[in-house]
Amino acid sequence: MAVSFSKKMGWVEYPSFNMATAKQWAPVNLFFCAMLFTGMTSLQHNSVPMVTIFKNITNIVVTAGDFYFFGSSVGGLVMAAFGIMLAGAVFAEE
């Protein structure tokens, strides 16, 4: 309702509903729902801090893959943030 109200007020613009576009985006929505489900299910077997650690380490792995496969550069502050995340993961294990 808030989005529709914003569109009528002219605050946001977006195209009208299109079934072809909805069909194209359906797999993305299904994968997103599967990600939410598996994230909630993982809490049955892991504690919240462990799930947070896994999510942080996933960011590091994705950045490493981006560097390896696409040659993108990583800034010094990003590396510092990754170091802090890894240090937190190590200390959380103890």
Image (cartoon, rainbow, N blue to C red):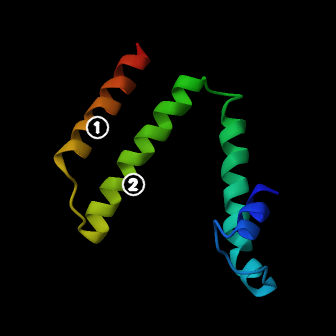
Q: Position of residue 16 (x, y in %)?
A: 76, 80
Q: Position of residue 5 (x, y in %)?
A: 78, 61
User: Mark 2 = which residue?
Assistant: 62
Q: Which quarter shows the C terminus? A: top left
Relative to residue 68, is residue 53 depicted above or below? above
User: Mark 1 = which residue?
Assistant: 81
Residue type, numbered disc 1: Ala
| Residue that protrudes farthest toward the top in the picture | 94
What is the quadrant of residue 62 in the picture?
A: bottom left
Q: Position of residue 67 (x, y in %)?
A: 27, 61
Residue type, numbered disc 2: Val
Q: At 73% across and 46% down in the image, what residue appears?
A: 37
Q: Where is residue 89 in the image (x, y as percent from the top left)?
A: 39, 26
Q: Residue 60 carries which label?
A: none
Q: Are marks 2 and 1 in contact (CB under 8 Å)?
A: no
Asked whether 42 or 72 is in front, the reply is: 72
Q: At 73% across and 55% down in the image, what residue appears?
A: 33
Q: Is residue 9 left or right of residue 89?
A: right
First in sequence: mark 2 vs mark 1: 2
| Residue that protrudes farthest toward the bottom in the picture | 20
| Badge nearest the viewer, 2 or 1 | 1
